[in-house]
């Protein structure tokens, strides 16, 4: 029993390392939010082929109902994929640590909305994880699981605590006037980059 306990402990510690911490950075770089705010990111060395296969095998065994979209990689993580790489296909891969991902909504590049089905980005506020809403399969998210593969999965079918999720969209507010009287009703639409105008959405603008 003692050996089994230590084996299980080592296993779970190893999984946590796979999902969260980054390796020693080879170098750092600067990327920018849509509003031009500088964000520090890390350039990391890739895993060995053996490590990549081990990561692939882990998700295949433990999450058979999720779909791997790529192989495992040490070079980028969930925050980098959700907030940067998914918007810039073909860009170099970077690792983006918390709280740098917060910058994308704190600077107003993204606004928080109430409706999950209208979101393009999701922040797992109950954990340290980011995802995008799949445009290929309705009801699914796509997210990079630490060093493990980029996965397509149900919102709660992940190694992360999914109890509290915040929904965001990259938006511009189109108004008929730049200065309207207080108390008047002014029509507006929220144009998302990943879809057409969102009509009737409940939107909370973050200051």
Image: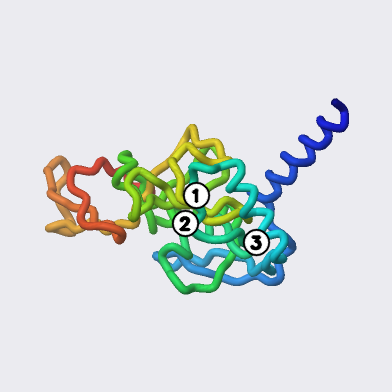
Q: Are marks 3 and 1 in contact (CB under 8 Å)?
A: no
Disc 1: which residue: 130
Disc 2: which residue: 82
| Between discs 3 and 1, the one toward the N terminus | 3
Q: Position of residue 20 (x, y in %)?
A: 65, 49
Q: Seen in the image, is 65 located left or right of residue 205?
A: right
Number of other residues with Cα within 10 Å of mark 1, as a class: few under 14, some 14 to 19, many 20 or more: many
Between residue 156 and residue 35, name the one nearer to us.
Answer: 156
| Between discs 3 and 2, the one toward the N terminus | 3
Q: Position of residue 16 (x, y in %)?
A: 68, 44
Give me the residue at 54% from left, 64% from top: 39
Give me the residue at 53% from left, 41% from top: 158
Q: Position of residue 136 (x, y in %)?
A: 34, 55
Q: Seen in the image, is 79 located left or right of residue 165?
A: right
Give me the residue at 12% from left, 58% from top: 176
Q: Are marks 2 and 1 in contact (CB under 8 Å)?
A: yes
Number of other residues with Cα within 10 Å of mark 3, as a class: few under 14, some 14 to 19, many 20 or more: many
Q: Seen in the image, is 136 located left or right of residue 99?
A: left
Disc 3: which residue: 74
Element under label 2? helix
Spatial distance from mark 3 to mark 2, Cα to Cα?
16 Å
Q: Position of residue 199 (x, y in %)?
A: 18, 47
Above or below 44: residue 125: above
| Between discs 2 and 1, the one toward the N terminus | 2
């Amino acid at each position: 029993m003692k050996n089994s306990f230590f084996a299980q402990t080592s296993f779970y510690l190893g999984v946590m390392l796979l999902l969260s911490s980054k390796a020693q950075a080879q170098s750092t770089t600067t990327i920018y939010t849509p509003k031009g705010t500088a964000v520090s990111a890390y350039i990391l060395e890739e895993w060995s082929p053996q490590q990549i296969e081990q990561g692939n095998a882990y998700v295949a065994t433990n999450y058979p109902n999720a779909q791997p979209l790529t192989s495992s990689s040490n070079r980028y993580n969930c925050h980098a994929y959700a907030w940067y790489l998914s918007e810039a296909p073909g860009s170099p891969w970077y690792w983006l640590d918390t709280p740098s991902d917060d910058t994308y909504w704190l600077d107003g590049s993204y606004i928080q909305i109430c409706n999950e089905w209208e979101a393009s980005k999701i922040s797992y506020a109950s954990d340290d994880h980011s995802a995008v809403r799949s445009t290929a399969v309705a009801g699914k998210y796509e997210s990079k699981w630490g060093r493990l593969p980029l996965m397509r999965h149900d919102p709660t079918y992940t190694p992360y605590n999914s109890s509290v999720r915040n929904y965001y969209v990259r938006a511009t507010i189109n108004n008929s006037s730049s200065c309207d009287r207080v108390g008047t009703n002014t029509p507006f639409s929220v144009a998302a980059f990943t879809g057409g105008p969102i009509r009737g959405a409940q939107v909370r603008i973050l200051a």
